[in-house]
Amino acid sequence: MSFRFRSGESPADAIQRLVVERTRSARSRLKRAPDGDAVHEARRDLKRLKALLEWVRPAVRGRDLRRWLRAVDRCSHPLSDVRDAQVRLRSLSWVTTGPRDQVLPAGSWNRLARRLRQELSRHVRLAGRGRRIRRLRERLSGWLREFQARGPSAWDWQMAQAGLRASYRRARRGLARAQACSDSATRHRWRRHIQILSDQLAPLGPAAFPAMAAWASGLEALRACLGLDHDLWLLREFLRGPGRDTLPSGERDRLLRVLRVRRRKLAADALRLGRRLFLLRSSRFLPAFQRLGQARQAAFEDVDLTGDTWAGREPMTGPEPATLADGNGVRFPGPDEPLRRR
């Protein structure tokens, strides 16, 4: 089930279809007692669903939108403990990559990993206990019926442009806050804005923006960097809370120091990458959408928006974005160039 707009599809029809598909996908994954992977995919569907709702904000009454967003949050919240437990186990493997005895002795590593697996199994059992999953599926079905009855029918490319600019503006403001106070809570809020913007760009696909692939890959790299920082924060909170007695104090303090160093490096990489990705003001972001309004009836693969808008070079594969430029002279500096605020 592709998370993409279809050729010749009107914006309102595309949003209606994508919301229905994501909701049904999340509901289908929650059958009886789901495992950790099913919970991850369901939460991913719900996050995409929330991004779509934020995107159609200009075409929906504020009261309806707030109620829909709360409904999606209520569906996602019961799955958070399972996902967090899964992430903590994965983070332990990542942070101790290499000779484990440099961070933890083998016996301590195995003991902590066993404790994290037990926590994951416990949360999976709790999530599937009684009627919880059935109630969650019923809540998703009820929310979907309401959206199909009252969803946006007049959403167009101009509204899509306004919604994306608003998401870009929030992500850019999140960067400013993270630069002013780079604590865990601030970076986590910034990460949410990055996730929403990334999930809103995904349905357009590379065919709609063939020259923005480099910028989009940089956004995905930033999202992954902030996500890994949050994952390590979850492991840190476990070691300082319910799992503090799993390791001897000396080994636990050593692991916490490693986590602190890794997170400091991730935070620095995220801020450096964010400064390059969000150099432009929101009013100059996505000029290609002015062309989309004129070509919305055409097939996406037939729309060429590279003439006087974005022109990317090679796609990004590392932490530094490639240079991007447009025909009006607006460009992102390369990795070795100084930053100049516009």
Image (cartoon, rainbow, N blue to C red):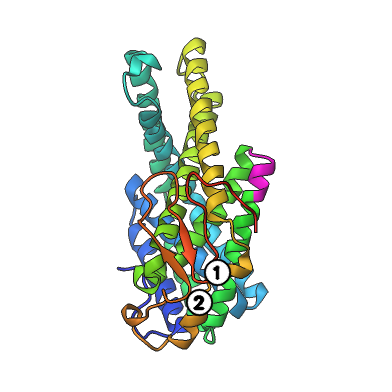
Residue 317 location (% of width, % of height): 36, 48
Q: Which mark is residue 164?
A: 1
Q: Is residue 330 above or below residue 157?
A: above
Residue found at x 42% / y 39%: 87
Residue at 57% x, 72% y is: 163
**Quarter of the rendering containing residue 30:** bottom left
Q: Which mark is residue 289?
A: 2
Front tag of 2 and 1: 2
- The kind of residue on which mark 2 rests is Phe
Q: CA distance from mark 2 to mark 1?
A: 10 Å
Write the start and end of the magenta stretch as one range. Answer: 176-182
Question: Which structural element holds mark 1?
Answer: helix
Q: Are marks 2 and 1 in contact (CB under 8 Å)?
A: yes
The residue depicted at 59 percent of the width and 80 percent of the height is 59
Is 267 or 186 nearer to us in this picture?
Answer: 267
Against 188, residue 328 (above or below) is: below
Q: Residues within 10 Å of mark 1 (few under 14, many from 20)?
A: many
SS type, badge 2: helix
Residue drawn at (35%, 56%) of the image: 314
x then y, percent, for residue 4 = 36, 71
Rendered location of residue 83, percent (x, y): 43, 44
Quarter of the image that includes the N terminus: bottom left
* The one of 127 and 279 positioned closer to us in this rendering: 279
Q: Quadrant of residue 167?
A: bottom right
Would residue 151 be visible to someone looking at this image? no
Q: Earlier in the sequence, mark 2 or mark 1?
A: 1
Query: Magenta includes 267?
Result: no
Characterize the magenta stretch by its predominant secondary structure.
helix
Q: Amino acid at mark 1?
A: Leu
Q: Residues within 10 Å of mark 2 (few under 14, many from 20)?
A: many
- Furthest-right residue in view? 180
